[in-house]
Amino acid sequence: MNMAPNYGITNNNEDEALLSSTDEPVQKTVKFAAATKQQLSISIPQPSDYTRNFNQGSQAAIIRSLRAAGVKFIRFATVDAYNTIRCKTVPLAQLSGQRRTNEVSSPLSNPVSIAEICFAGLPTSADVPAAPNLSSRNVLTLQPDFSSLRILPYASKTAMVMCTAHNQQTQELSPLCSRGLLQRVLHSAKEDLGIEFNVGAELEFMLYRENKDGIMQPVDMSTFGNATTLNEQEDFISTLYDQLERQDIPVELIHSESAPGQLEVVLSYSDDILQLADDIVYARETVTNVAKQHGMKALFLPKTSMMAAGNGSHLHFSFREAGSQHRNAFSDPSQPTGISRKGESFIERLLDHLPSLLSLSIPTVNSFRRVGPGCWTGHKLGWSTEDKDSPVRVCIDLNTQQASNVELKLSDAAANIYLELATILAAGMEGIKNGKVLRPMMNDENNALPLPQSLQESLDSLKKDELLLSILGDELSTAYVAVRELEARTETRLEEEVAAALNRA
């Protein structure tokens, strides 16, 4: 009789005897071969003990998806302390090859590095070291945040991802990383104060075109809210909107502004502050490149003419209790000001530190050309409700007629948005924590102190501001002050600044 192969199953002796004496099938008693603990060389977790790694394979999926979309290159980008985008490009094929050959298990994790001095030691005008405490000896690796990954519509074979900077040996977050600083501040707001912020941004820029004589000039002589720029630049505006939408950057409003050829793009209010900061970086790059596609140049330079309005980048702030999806904790109709106690404390501490904060929010010599009477930016230290000439303006919701947020008007595109947001929010948080009492609203009768009138004056204030210096940390604050003071000493004529900005645009 043919016997089936024995796969570790044995019959007892009585069954074997019955099988040998008769050919009739009988019910066998079957038992598994003994498997003792000593024989097991592996340990398999129980289902209740097993946690799946949801990130496993994600890098391979990203590479495949980008390749399917026609992407050939990935830019790994960071923004230095002086708002210069520093990036390196890696061919997608190189990353794919590393993954296939198992040369690198996670090819997207630490693909590039940049010298430490590039993060806070180089002025905007040239790659000449200006920070006494930084050198080219140390290198920081860029670790990508894939939530910021975008395919660039104006360079469709390229994707870009924003990164944080890390120590090459320890992989610790670098104190020079401005994006990492903002992440740390937001974490503290939620964990220590139980609040989550909402922020909105207004981006102003001017469009220039070469005239028949070869001279670059604004595309029109329009004024605020005029339809001229909207009509004549409709193709540009439509392309810009489409490309922002493709990058998942929501736009709330577009209108002409006060200066010749000037437009404002309002980004939608967001409770994802890090993403909003990334969106601002991507949006400015998109504006610049779409303008080129339409035969123009876009300038974000704070001041292009002393006879015309400048370009700002106003920011709006409110907050809610952590975990609450709807209630605006900045507003309180029962209060005389219409602002909650925490909202008032946020504003008061913002005002306390505003002279120092200006070195981060309007951080160039050119920036301070926007500041003064009649510039609608505010030039005195105070707050008001719906006053366009107040540096800190409480805004009223059009539908509820209640205080909805506070706007900082002394902000422009020369600022590193991550540093700016981190220091503003941290100052306001300190006010909330200590219950600061809001000063009276600024009016013609009270004598508000003047704000700094120059970059150097604001830097002098920053050097004495213990809170902001502690937020920035010794390494970053030392480098930042040194480089900005160098720029303050080497003031450039406005006409030369405009010419240089047009050459770069």
Image (cartoon, grey):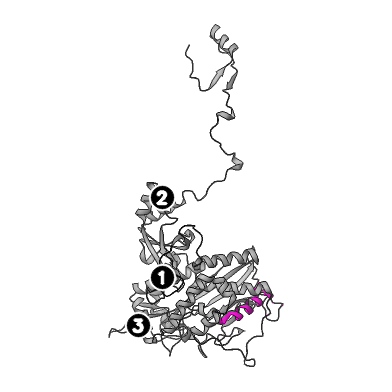
Cα separation, mark 3 vs mark 1, equals 21 Å
Mark whose residue sits in front, 2 or 3: 2
Provide the residue span drawn in magenta: 326-355
Q: Disc 1 or disc 2, which is closer to the eye?
A: 2
Residue 199 visible in the snapshot: no
Spatial distance from mark 1 to mark 2, Cα to Cα?
A: 33 Å
As for residue 338 lying within the magenta part, the answer is yes
Percent across and percent down for residue 319 are: 62, 70
Residue occupied by mark 2: 104
Q: Which residue is mark 3?
A: 499
Q: What is the number of callouts on the image?
A: 3
Q: Indicate which disc, 3 or 1, sits on the residue closer to the N terminus.
A: 1
In the rendered image of this protein, does residue 221 appear above or below residue 480?
Answer: below
Q: Residue at x 43, y 50 (%)?
A: 60
The residue positioned farthest toward the bottom in the image shown: 445
Q: Which residue is mark 1?
A: 286
Gap between marks 2 and 3 measured at Cα: 46 Å
Quadrant in which residue 126 is drawn: bottom left
Between residues 15 and 398, which one lies in front from this camera angle?
Answer: 15
Expressed as whole percent of the image width and height from the top left, the position of residue 52 reads 54, 46
The quadrant where residue 62 appears: bottom left
Task: Give, as a three-letter code, the residue at label 2.
Answer: Val
